[in-house]
Image: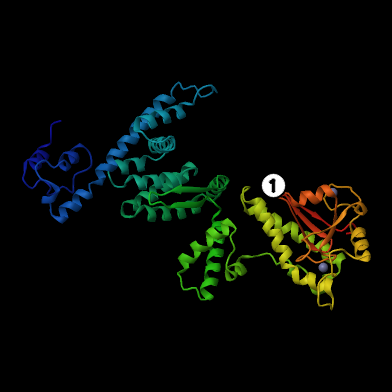
Amino acid sequence: MALPVEIAEIVGEAREWEGRGWFPPGPQLAVCLSGGKESLKDLTDGELLEVAAARRQTSWAQARELAAIAELAGRRAVGGSEDDPRVLTSHESVTDEVAAALTVTGNAAATLVRLAERLAVELPGTREALEAGRIDLAKARVICDVTESLPADAAERLETAALEKAPAQTSGQLRRRITRMARHLAPEAVEERKRDAVRGRRLEVWDNSSGTANLALCDLPLEDAHAVYNKISAAARGLKHEGDARSLGILRVELAPRLLSGAELPDAARALLVEEPGAAEELSAPQVDDDVAVPALAAMVERRLAHVRARVSLDALPVAVRRAAQRIHDELAERRDAVCQGDDEEHGRPGYRPPAALRREVEERHGTCVFPSCNQPSRRCDLDHTISWRPGPTCRCNLAPLCRRHHRLKQSPGWSLFQIWPGLLIWTTPAGAWYIVRPDRT
Ligand SMILES: [Zn+2]
Ligand SMILES: [Zn+2]
């Protein structure tokens, strides 16, 4: 290529870096940047910055790359076999062609092809600005991203407005400014795009080379993401209030994985996180009457366990459900003492065998074995201590009829049975399901 006179002069000069600022990106600037005689060590600080600013040459090269991709995609689209289900669409096929040629993943290639096509057709101003080095690829991507799925006229106005300030803004400043404008220009389209994105919400984990990993909840609705963040922050402040000297940032990151893994939380944090009233609080003082207490407690159990099921993975579900049932049982301990014990010192009758009157009461309460599908009459069942005798009391709150088979099922791995209130039982299964068994008459 023949060089223009002024370039030839500069390349031939000893101080060939001087006065380079005015060169537009392209072949001329490439010649200048190639240096020739001098190494970077010989340059002044100002000259080094000038070379660094020559990233406009990179922008130019990237614009050329994208133009070539768009040209190729355009050629493949002509006479493509879009309706034949046996083969890829021309768009998919050119994406693979680009992926193989540039050695990038399919996703990266798809993003490039999409960007190339939009710059070629819908965003000519952005393409020109990139080619002229007024903006870099990151800013071109921002403009492409924010105008995506806007109506054509809104996209055009947004592009014009974006390019006015883009050269002097960082890509972050640019994104914030034009995202605001997009909401103003085309509120419905922005809302629709948000709904689309939320449909693709997901939990992602990726490993870092430092031996750590990142965990991210992606594409949650903005208000949900901030609600979770605020809640964790509130719990972290609770801990600080209790005298924890660590920073809020550290406390947040201590709490979040424990919440997600279902580990026990410090009381100060738990108190701030639990929305549901505890089991004991479900019962107001007069509600110790079983007719009122049992339905209220059964509804509470259903709600709390459903709450657990909605929040844990399938793997963690059996353990989480069992723990939640255990917790409900434990929370009600004092109330059971109060309702069974009256003024006695001891809760329950002395000895392992229930007295006849107590036996009759329990058999009347449940006419059959308390396994949900079992019809074995309670007269022919054992009266099982739900919690084995000592520590479990011989009391109406800890006795229930079980046939032989379901007595053995109760001991089998993965199964458990809780009696949270006299006659109100919860079975939990190896799969993390639960069954609530009430007294027959309620
Ligand atoms: Zn009792
Ligand atoms: Zn049974």
Ligand 1 located in image quadrant: bottom right
Q: Residue at x 51, y 73 (%)?
A: 240
Left or right, residue 77 beside residue 332: left
Colour mapping used in the image: rainbow
Up/down of 195 relative to 301, above or below = above
Q: Residue at x 75, y 61 (%)?
A: 300
Q: Label 1 amino acid?
A: Ala
Query: What residue does disc 1 label?
Result: 431
Q: Residue at x 49, y 25 (%)?
A: 88
Up/down of 239 relative to 46, above or below = below
Across and down, in percent, residue 381 comes to 88, 53
Across and down, in percent, residue 333 comes to 75, 69
Quadrant in the rendering for residue 24:
top left
Q: Residue at x 84, y 47 (%)?
A: 373
Q: Secondary structure at mark 1?
A: loop
Left or right, residue 425 beside residue 166: right
Up/down of 438 relative to 236, above or below = above
Can residue 286 be seen at all in this image of the molecule? Answer: no
Quadrant in the rendering for residue 59:
top left
Across and down, in percent, residue 395 comes to 84, 66
188 and 153: which is toward the camera: 188
Can residue 80 be seen at all in this image of the molecule? Answer: yes
Across and down, in percent, residue 283 comes to 78, 69
